[in-house]
């Protein structure tokens, strides 16, 4: 309660001193300037008005800009802004060339944002999978199903809706400009505000409508240019640079054809800007700087969100490659990330937060050096592919083999098809995930950690119950009694589909992480070495599976259940730790470091209070379950009557 009261007091003290306009006021003015820069050419040509309606609109918008700037709070830059707005209005009145008006409008818009900063970009690449449905629901009736401006409602609108397929016009529009119009609408037109939509949806729509003038066929060439041309990548170090630039400015530097191809690619794959193919961690450093600035300003939540974004949006996409090249450095980064988040979350003194931030930034510099293209080698790709598949595959293999061995021990081979169908379906789903993540959408760091975290916890819960159940059946008499009473009936009632689901979940969780690692390793270019590493790991896993199945058939039933119960219990504890760690890295759970605990990822052991407590809780539940099941079995074996 004390922290809440303090935060409330700081907020109350800050509010009266705030002499800044609302973001909407500045953004509206910026939007009007952008509209003038783009559409003035349709009103005036060679010093003559060619459209009375367009010219009247330009005059009105210039007047609005001047009025709105005059109403802004005083700043040292305001007099110059007022002078520029008056000069722009006079230039339009004098019917100067379109190039002059466009240049003055854009320069004034840039100066406006410098004087009154507002958010210019989404905090993360938008989810474009939602965009087509959003467009159909909100935009197609006016702008047309394919963005040509000929929707069913277009005929009754004056002025008519914009044709997003008009490349000459699209070349002059930035994604930020599209976002502003979507968010606030456009006075004097039929374009209404869609500010009620979530911010992420509005950004998704801006990226989607910004694609229409640039065909998808050009995106593949754009991807090649993006991967091969470091100069082009340097133009877009972050999302703010991407959404603020127009294709026309890019064309002036690289040529119209390359600009169109790059625009087609980046507006369909904005995640490419944050997942740098050259190992650059510019976004990571930028987010860390912003996080520290927010903490200094008293915005702990903003600082925490930006620190998390530095990891998930900046570092997570290149983590698989770093894991293959320097796993020790990756572990140090994850530990330092936890320490920074803990320092911010606990509201520690600014000096401690600065030290934690600086330490993490230095580690990211080391990571960037390790990720440099010249550090790529066939050996690192081989070892990375081998290690990832062996580590991830072994966990799934142990669980699936235990299920297969159980069915063979119970002589229910007719149900084996469900288990095999589950893991095969998981492999197929994994391939589909790789295809979708490669060619359609990007899997964000948060999505990955959430999938792994919740998947691990679900598997851990299932294995806790299965392990306790198996321990209770480790006594031969108890097992024979159970077989007679339960197994035959249970396996005859669609329980095969439960086995299918369990097999699918435990395998897909591992496949999901493996394919994301492999996608990153493949981008290094050492495809033969990577395939060799994965082939060796697959062969070793097959050998382990053969040994386990062969040995399990020779075990007496009570030993089989005893060893299986222990194995499953260990896996449950491991997955409990991994599940909590995944949710921490996704920002769902807080982090409290434990400096005395080592990081042993293969055991699910991570140096945080939350992960250790989760594993301790799993051990306690297993111990209690084993004790209770053992006691129940002993009671069942005790003589029922004096005659015995």
Image (cartoon, rainbow, N blue to C red):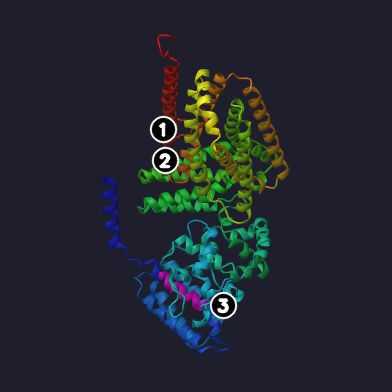
Residue nearest the observer in this picture, 107 or 470: 470
Q: Residue 229 is drawn in which quadrant?
A: bottom right
- Seen from this angle, which residue lies furthest right? 528
Residue holding disc 2: 591
Q: Residue 67 is drawn in which quadrant?
A: bottom left
Residue nearest the observer in this picture, 184 or 593: 184
- Seen from this angle, which residue lies furthest front? 643
Number of marks drawn: 3
Residue holding disc 1: 613
Q: Could you classify mark 3 by the number of other residues whose Cα lies within 10 Å: few (under 14), some (14-19), or many (20 or more)? A: some
Q: Indicate yes or no whether the magenta region holds residue 35.
A: yes
Residue 176 visible in the picture: no
Q: Which residues fall within the magenta stretch?
A: 26-37
Q: Could you classify mark 2 by the number of other residues whose Cα lies within 10 Å: few (under 14), some (14-19), or many (20 or more)? A: many
- Numbered disc in front, either 3 or 1: 3
Give the side of residue 351 with respect to residue 405, left or right. left
- Numbered disc in front, either 1 or 2: 1
**Residue 378 location (% of width, % of height):** 70, 41
- The kind of secondary structure element at disc 1 is helix
């Amino acid at each position: 309660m004390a922290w809440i009261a303090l935060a409330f007091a700081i907020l109350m003290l800050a509010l009266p001193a705030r002499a800044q306009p609302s973001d909407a006021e500045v953004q509206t003015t910026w939007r009007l300037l952008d509209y003038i820069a783009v559409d003035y050419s349709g009103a005036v040509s060679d010093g003559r008005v060619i459209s009375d309606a367009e010219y009247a609109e330009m005059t009105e918008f210039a007047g609005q800009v001047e009025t709105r700037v005059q109403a802004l709070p005083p700043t040292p830059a305001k007099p110059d802004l007022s002078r520029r707005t008056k000069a722009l209005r006079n230039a339009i009145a004098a019917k100067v060339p379109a190039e002059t008006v466009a240049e003055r409008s854009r320069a004034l818009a840039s100066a406006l944002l410098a004087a009154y900063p507002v958010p210019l970009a989404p905090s993360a690449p938008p989810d474009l999978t939602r965009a087509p449905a959003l467009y159909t629901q909100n935009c197609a009736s006016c702008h047309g199903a394919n963005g040509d401006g000929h929707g069913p409602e277009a005929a009754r609108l004056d002025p008519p809706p914009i044709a997003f397929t008009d490349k000459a016009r699209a070349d002059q529009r930035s994604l930020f400009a599209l976002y502003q119009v979507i968010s606030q609408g456009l006075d004097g037109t039929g374009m209404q505000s869609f500010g009620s939509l979530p911010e992420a949806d509005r950004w998704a729509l801006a990226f989607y409508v910004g694609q229409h003038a640039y065909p998808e066929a050009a995106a593949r060439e754009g991807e090649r240019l993006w991967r091969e041309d470091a100069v082009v990548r340097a133009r877009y170090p972050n999302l703010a640079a991407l959404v603020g630039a127009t294709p026309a400015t890019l064309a002036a530097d690289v040529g119209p054809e390359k600009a169109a191809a790059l625009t087609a690619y980046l507006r369909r794959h904005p995640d490419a800007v944050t997942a740098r193919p050259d190992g650059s961690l510019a976004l990571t450093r930028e987010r860390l700087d912003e996080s520290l600035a927010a903490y200094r300003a008293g915005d702990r939540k903003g600082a925490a969100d930006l620190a998390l974004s530095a990891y998930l949006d900046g570092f997570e996409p290149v983590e698989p490659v770093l894991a293959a090249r320097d796993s020790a450095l990756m572990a140090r980064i994850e530990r330092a990330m936890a320490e920074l988040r803990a320092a911010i979350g606990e509201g520690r003194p600014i000096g401690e937060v600065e030290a934690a931030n600086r330490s993490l930034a230095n580690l990211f510099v080391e990571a960037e050096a390790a990720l440099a293209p010249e550090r790529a080698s066939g050996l690192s790709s081989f070892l990375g592919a081998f290690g990832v598949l062996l580590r991830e595959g072994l966990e799934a293999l142990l669980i699936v083999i235990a299920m297969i061995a159980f069915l063979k021990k119970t002589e229910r081979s007719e149900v084996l098809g469900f288990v095999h169908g589950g893991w095969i379906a998981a492999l197929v789903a994994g391939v589909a995930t790789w295809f979708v993540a490669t060619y359609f959408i990007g899997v964000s760091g948060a999505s990955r950690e959430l999938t792994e975290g919740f998947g691990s916890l679900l598997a851990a819960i299932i294995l806790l119950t299965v392990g306790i159940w198996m321990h209770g059946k480790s006594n031969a008499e108890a097992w024979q009694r159970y077989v007679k009473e339960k197994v035959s009936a249970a396996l005859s009632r669609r329980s095969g589909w439960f086995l299918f689901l369990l097999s699918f979940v435990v395998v897909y969780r591992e496949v999901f992480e493996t394919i994301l690692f492999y996608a990153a390793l493949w981008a290094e270019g050492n495809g033969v070495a990577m395939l060799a590493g994965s082939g060796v790991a697959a062969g070793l896993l097959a050998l382990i599976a053969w040994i386990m199945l062969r040995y399990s058939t020779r075990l007496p039933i009570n030993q089989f259940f005893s060893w299986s119960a222990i194995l499953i219990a260990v896996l449950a504890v491991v997955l409990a730790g991994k599940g909590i760690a995944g949710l921490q890295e996704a920002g769902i759970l807080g982090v409290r470091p434990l400096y005395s605990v080592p990081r042993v990822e293969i055991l699910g052991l991570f140096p945080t209070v939350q992960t250790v407590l989760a594993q301790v809780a799993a051990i306690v539940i297993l111990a209690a379950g084993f004790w209770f099941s053992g006691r129940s079995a002993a009671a069942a074996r005790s003589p029922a009557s004096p005659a015995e």
